[in-house]
Amino acid sequence: MLFNIFQIFIGALIVGFSGAVTPGPMFTLVISRTAQKGFWASFFIVSGHAIMELMVLMLFLAGIIKYLNNNMIIKIIGVAGGTVLLFLSFELLYSTFKNKTKVDLNKKDMNVKLDKDNKSHSVFQGMFVSIINPYWYVWWVTVGSAFLIKSMKYGITGVSSFYIGHIFSDFIWYLFIGFLVSKGRKFISKKIYKAIMISCGIFLLYLGIKFIMDFIKR
């Protein structure tokens, strides 16, 4: 049984990586927020995402998530999520072009501690960006549900192994990205920083349009 539990953990970790490394709203948020606030922003963003993952897992165990496996509901979520991404894109681009995004590129990021408000804001952003991503729901009602059903054979130990493995992949990948971005801040000029913010905004714009088009055609 111990070997089976370990297999569930490794399987969840590997499949989690396949989703985590795919550029999306979460990836863009980690880059832009870490560039603004430093390394620890990435940790709290992923913590917010982990909270939402746990909530979805609990909903699944309660039998509620099966109602999301409906084409119309998924289409509505996709269009709504895409619309919010468009808004976030315009907001990021506007603040960047208007120089409203405040950042200190000279801070030693690994030693910077976010204040309570910034921690809460980063956690909320991690939760929010999960909710508005329609592919997150699709993953849970397809791949995620299949893995979870398999892990349920081993009770709470199996389910916990699945969840921990899945979340570990997110923390490992996004903290790695946060580390690279935060360390790179010392070598980034304000022009390069602005270019990064604009790139993130354009990518969010692309994702918003793509989500809307993909799920309208669904």
Image (cartoon, rainbow, N blue to C red):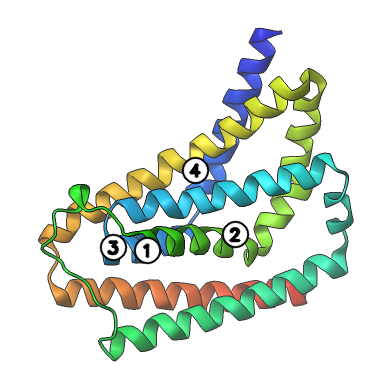
Badge 3 is on which residue?
37
Helix, strand, or loop for circle 2?
Answer: helix
Depth check, mark 3 against mark 2: the one in front is: 3
Crowd band around label 4 with a 10 angstrom C-alpha radius: few (<14), some (14–19), many (20+): many
Left or right of 136: which side holds 152?
right
Badge 2 is on which residue?
130
Q: Quadrant of the N terminus?
A: top right
Q: Kindly identify the amino acid type of the residue bearing the numbered disc 2.
A: Ser
Left or right of 88: which side holds 8?
right
Crowd band around label 3 with a 10 angstrom C-alpha radius: few (<14), some (14–19), many (20+): many
Asked whether 19 or 44 is in front, the reply is 44
Depth check, mark 2 against mark 1: the one in front is: 1
Left or right of 192: which side holds 71?
right
Q: Earlier in the sequence, mark 3 or mark 1?
A: 3
User: Residue 95: percent from the left, percent from the top?
Assistant: 34, 85
Crowd band around label 1 with a 10 angstrom C-alpha radius: few (<14), some (14–19), many (20+): some
Q: Which mark is residue 118?
A: 1
